[in-house]
Amino acid sequence: MTDDEFEKHLEEEPDPQLDPERSPGLHADIDALEDIEVSRADVTIGEATPAELAAADTEPVEGDDPSELLADLAADSEIDRRRAALALKDRATTETIVAGLAYAATNDPDDDVRQFAVEALTAHGTDAGSGTETGEAAAAVAVELLDDPDPWVRSEAVVALDNLDREAHESDLETALDDDHHAVRRNAAISLFKLRGEAMADLLLEQSRDDSERVREWAAHMLGGVDEDRARDRLRELTDDPATVVRQTAERALEVEPRRFRRQFGGALENDSRLLPGEDRLNRMPDL
C-alpha cells in the first residue's frame, strides 16, 4: 500500500474505538446498583484539608505580579508556595522566574511544591525551545529530579524530559524504566515508545508482566502498535489478566491497526485519574 493509499484508508475507515457500540454500559443487564462491578476496591480516600485541595486553584493569585508570586515561593505556608509555583507557569518567561522555579523544584521541602515547580519550569523551557538557555536549565533540573525521594516528583521529571527534548535525554528516560514506582516506569516507557515505536516490543512484553496493573495497562495499550505475532499472542493472554482495566485495554489493543496506532499515538489514555493505595489525590497525575 502506498503512502497516498494509506492516507486515504485512514480517512475512509472509521476508528473502531470511537464506535458507540463500545460504550462500557451498552447492552449490560443491570437491574440495581449492586450489579455494577467495582474493581478498584483497593483505592483509599485521602484526608486532604479544604485548603490543600484548593492549592491547585490559582484564581486567588491570578492578578498578582510575578514579583509577588516569587515572594510567595518562600512563604511559610506550603499551600501558598504550591499555588505560586503553578501560577508562575502562566507568566512571561524571565531569568528571575526560571531561577525561582528551579530553586523551588530542587530545594523546597514540600513534595507538591517541587512537582508543581518543575511542571511550571518545563512550560517555560518548552516555550523557549530546546537548546535555549531556559530549555537547558529546565532539562537540567528535570534530570536532577529523577533522583528525588518522592515518586510523583520523579514522574513529573520524566514528563518534563519528554516535553523538553526526549531524544536528547533518551538515556535518562531509559534509566527511569528501572524506577521502583509504577508511574515513573510507565511514563518512561510512553516517552521511549514515541521515539522507538515497534523497537520497544521486548520492553513492552516485559512490562506486560509488571507487578503494577497500571504498568501492565499501558504496556497492553502500546503493544497495540506492535505488528508482531508475539505482541498479539501476549495481548490475548492479557485478556485474562486479573485486573479488569488490563483486560479491557488488551481487548481494545487487539482491534487497532498497528500502523495507524503508531501514527496517532500521543501518550494519553482516558481515565488516568484513578489513585492506587498510597497515592495523594492532591497530586495531579503526570500527563504525557
Image (cartoon, rainbow, N blue to C red):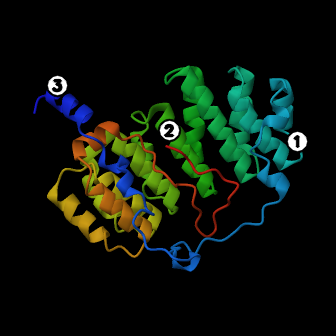
Q: What residue do we see at 30% from left, 49% from top?
A: 16
Residue 203: tell me if it is visible. Answer: no
Residue 59, located in which quarter of the rendered image? top right
Say which residue appears at 19% left-offset and 50% top-offset.
227
Nearest to the observer: residue 226 or residue 171: 226
Mark 2 — residue?
A: 161
Helix, strand or loop for disc 2: helix
Find residue 75 and name its label.
Answer: 1
Residue at the limit of the structure toward the left, as seen here: 1
Three-letter code for the amino acid on which mark 3 is drawn = Asp
Amino acid type of the residue tagged 2 in the rendering: Leu
Label 3 Cα neighbours within 10 Å, binned few <14 / some 14-19 / many ≥20: few
User: Residue 4's mark?
Assistant: 3
Question: Of marks 3 and 1, which one's residue comes earlier in the chain?
Answer: 3
Instruction: Provide the secondary structure element on which disc 3 rests.
Output: helix
- Residue type at the position of mark 1: Ala
Residue at 77 percent across and 44 percent down: it is: 82
Q: Is residue 44 left or right of residue 266?
A: right
Considering every residue shown, the one lying at the far front of the view is 31
The correct choice, above or below, for 158 with respect to 251 in the image is: above
Q: CA distance from mark 3 to mark 1?
A: 58 Å
Helix, strand or loop for disc 1: loop
The answer to whether 143 is drawn above or below residue 185 in the figure is above
- Drawn side of residue 159 relative to residue 278, left or right: left
Q: Quadrant of residue 92?
A: top right
- Sort mark 2 into few (<14), some (14-19) or many (20+) by Cα contacts within 10 Å: many
Which quadrant of the figure contains the N terminus?
top left
> Closer to the N terminus: mark 1 or mark 2?
1
Coordinates of residue 144 in the picture (x, y in percent): 58, 43
| Observer-nearest of 80 and 272 | 272
Position of residue 148 measured from the top left corner of the image (x, y, whole percent): 62, 52
